[in-house]
């Protein structure tokens, strides 16, 4: 595999210097495949993106398959034993494994089912008599070592392109260290709290350019917590704005990134009732 890679690298040069074009594979576990689809949404930049890497595995876009890849992008959460095995094989094959999207990073919307004590009941309710194996939804990092996470539900294509460019050029990848509110203010949006709607912008990691608040929707935290997220302050804002803590809990539970905070709040609210 490595010799093959080297040969392809050597084919591309700029001013006599070899330009790397690593073989890249995309995989999906339990997911809606929306993150992979995002990559094809950017028609203006698609050809440049495809030129950057050699895609050797991408079920949504090609029939050819290869186990020879350096970078594996894995979308979706782990909910079945066969997915666990597949993920370990991907880890063995790849030099770098990237968790693509909230399902892969935190369990995503799939992890909502983990709140039910009886998962067999959940499977029966959802699939009826159709026998299907489905366990608790887990992020990739619960099963294998993950080298890099790309957050979002779905991921933002411009961010993926920037990260892939950095990976190809061997540059470090940095995620924003500030919360969504910074991007929201830069876009001069009216704060949704002032319109009576909850928003996780104060505690959620930026990088989506305040996608939801810019479209008049409060943030649901799909990118997970910002470093040093001030949960106590968020709670104070929610109380001051006379928004119920149950509505805050709905948002904290949605994607799995705030699982610890949601667990504490749920216990508190259940203790009150
Ligand atoms: S993170 Fe969201 S868009 Fe991506 S696969 Fe999961 S549910 Fe779909
Ligand atoms: S709308 Fe949300 S993201 Fe924007 S400033 Fe208000 S709390 Fe922050
Ligand atoms: S605003 Fe919040 S919920 Fe919307 S895309 Fe950004 S991080 Fe996700």
Image (tube, rainbow, N blue to C red):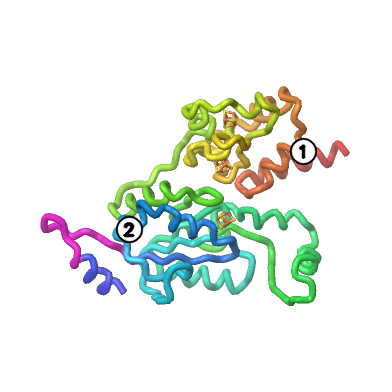
Answer left or right for 163 relative to 11: right
* Residue at mark 1: 246
Q: Position of residue 27 (x, y in %)?
A: 48, 66
Magenta stretch?
10-23
Give the residue number, with chain letter if any, for mark 2. 47
Q: From the viewer's perspective, is 259 left or right of 42? A: right
Q: Quadrant of ligand 2?
A: top right
Q: Position of residue 74 (x, y in %)?
A: 49, 62
From what the image shows, is residue 57 above or below residue 254? below
Q: Residue furthest front?
A: 43
Please name which of the two marks, 1 or 2, marks the residue nearer to the observer: 2
Q: Which mark is residue 144?
A: none
Foreground pick, 188 / 117: 188
- Image quadrant in which you'd find residue 181: top right
Count residues near mark 2 (Cα–Cα under 10 Å), then give few for <14, some for 14-19, many for 20+.
Answer: few
Image quarter of residue 71: bottom left
- Looking at marks 1 and 2 on the same chain, the residue that comes earlier in the sequence is marked by 2
Residue drawn at x 59%, y 61% as measured from the top left: 32
Mark 1 element type: helix
The picture places residue 233, in percent across and down from the top left corner, at 64, 27
Give 230 or 176, whichever is nearer the viewer.
Answer: 176
Q: How many marks?
A: 2
Image vertical order of residue 122 relative to residue 44, above or below: below
Q: Quadrant of the N terminus?
A: bottom left
Residue depicted at 41% across the width and 70% down the height: 57
| Left or right for 256, reference 90 | right
Residue found 55% across the figure and 45% down from its top: 223
Q: Relative to residue 147, is residue 66 depicted above or below?
A: below
């Amino acid at each position: 595999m490595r010799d093959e890679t080297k040969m392809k690298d050597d084919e591309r040069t700029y001013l006599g210097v070899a330009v790397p074009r690593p073989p890249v594979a995309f995989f999906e576990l339990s997911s809606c495949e929306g993150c992979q689809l995002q990559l094809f949404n950017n028609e203006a930049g698609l050809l440049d993106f495809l030129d950057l890497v050699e895609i050797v595995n991408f079920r949504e876009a090609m029939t050819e398959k290869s186990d020879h890849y350096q970078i594996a992008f894995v979308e979706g959460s782990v909910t079945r034993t066969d997915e666990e095995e597949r993920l370990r094989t991907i880890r063995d094959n790849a030099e770098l494994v990237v968790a693509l999207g909230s399902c892969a990073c935190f369990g995503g919307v799939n992890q909502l089912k983990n709140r039910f004590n009886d998962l067999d009941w959940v499977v029966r309710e959802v699939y009826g008599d159709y026998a299907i194996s489905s366990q608790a939804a887990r992020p990739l990092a619960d099963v294998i070592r993950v080298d890099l996470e790309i957050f979002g539900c779905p991921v933002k294509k411009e961010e993926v392109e920037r990260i892939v460019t950095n990976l190809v050029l061997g540059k470090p990848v940095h995620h924003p260290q500030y919360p969504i509110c910074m991007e929201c203010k830069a876009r001069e949006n009216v704060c949704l709290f002032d319109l009576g709607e909850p928003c996780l912008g104060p505690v959620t990691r930026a990088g989506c350019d305040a996608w939801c608040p810019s479209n008049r929707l409060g943030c649901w935290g799909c990118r997970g917590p910002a470093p040093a997220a001030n949960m106590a302050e968020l709670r104070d804002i929610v109380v001051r704005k006379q928004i119920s803590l149950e509505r805050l809990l709905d948002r904290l539970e949605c994607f799995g990134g705030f699982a610890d905070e949601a667990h504490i709040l749920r216990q508190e609210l259940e203790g009150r009732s």
